[in-house]
Amino acid sequence: MLAALVLALTATLPPHPVAPAAPPDVSSLAWLAGCWQSDGAEPGSGESWMLPAGGTMFGMSRTVKGGRTVAFEFMELRVLADGRLAFVAHPSGQEGTTFPLLRAESGEAVFENTAHDFPQRVVYARDGASKLKARIEGTRNGKPLVIPFPMTRVACDARPAGAGE
């Protein structure tokens, strides 16, 4: 009888409150820091990311074709005023576009802005210690499009082949 009473009382108690998981901060993406050479691209093509500091990470990318820079992008990872982590892209001198974090798992971060023309999603995923699989995704002209950017970690002080002193 006592056991039934205890069971009945505990069944009506609210469950223990569970604190919501803290949103990821910039330091959770420190694995992205360093220099990354674009696989299969001309020397000098790739991305460089600074270590997290002051609540931000800054990166830049460059695409070289025919020995000339044809595209560049300044990037930032930061926490927005609403507390969400975001990737902010400033491609080739254009206005910045903000992609809030959709999800982050060990070695992968997915940012999304469905209101943007293209891309709507930016993904960074580690592949071991020396590979990075970045990609942009979305819809262009009504058709799904994925553009991969595979990269390999390189020393940040390495000179691209053919670079002067």
Image (spheres, rainbow, N blue to C red):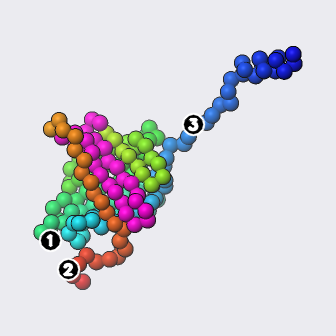
Task: Determine whether, in the image, residue 81 is placed left or right of residue 62.
Answer: right
The residues bearing labels 3 and 1 have C-alpha atoms spaced at a distance of 50 Å
Q: Which type of secondary structure does the marked residue at label 1 adopt?
A: loop
Mark 2 sits on what residue? 162
Residue 138, magenta (yes or no): yes
Q: Amino acid at mark 2?
A: Gly
Which secondary structure class fits the magenta region best?
Answer: strand
Density class for disc 2 (Cα within 10 Å; few <14, some 14-19, many ≥20) is: few
Q: Nearer the viewer, residue 33 or 1?
A: 1
| Disc sitting over residue 121 in the figure | none
Q: Tell me which numbered mark, 2 or 1, is placed earlier along the sequence.
A: 1
Give the quadrant of residue 49: bottom left
Q: Is residue 17 above or below residue 79?
A: above
Give the quadrant of residue 59: bottom left
Q: Amino acid at mark 3?
A: Pro
Q: Tell me which numbered mark, 3 or 1, is placed earlier along the sequence.
A: 3
x%, y% of residue 144? 22, 40
Let me know if residue 79 appears in the view. no
Task: Determine whether, in the image, residue 64 is placed left or right of residue 121.
Answer: left
Mark 1 sits on what residue? 67
**Residue at the right extreme, as displayed:** 2
**Residue at the bottom extreme, as displayed:** 165
x%, y% of residue 121? 31, 44
Q: Nearer the viewer, residue 123 or 76?
A: 123
Which residue is found at the position 48% from the left and 52% from the top? 106
The magenta region covers: 114-140
Which residue is found at the position 27% from the left and 65% from the top? 39
Which residue is found at the position 19% from the left and 59% from the top? 71
Which residue is found at the position 32% from the left and 77% from the top? 158
The residues bearing labels 2 and 1 have C-alpha atoms spaced at a distance of 9 Å
Let me know if residue 30 appears in the view. yes
Mark 3 sits on what residue? 20
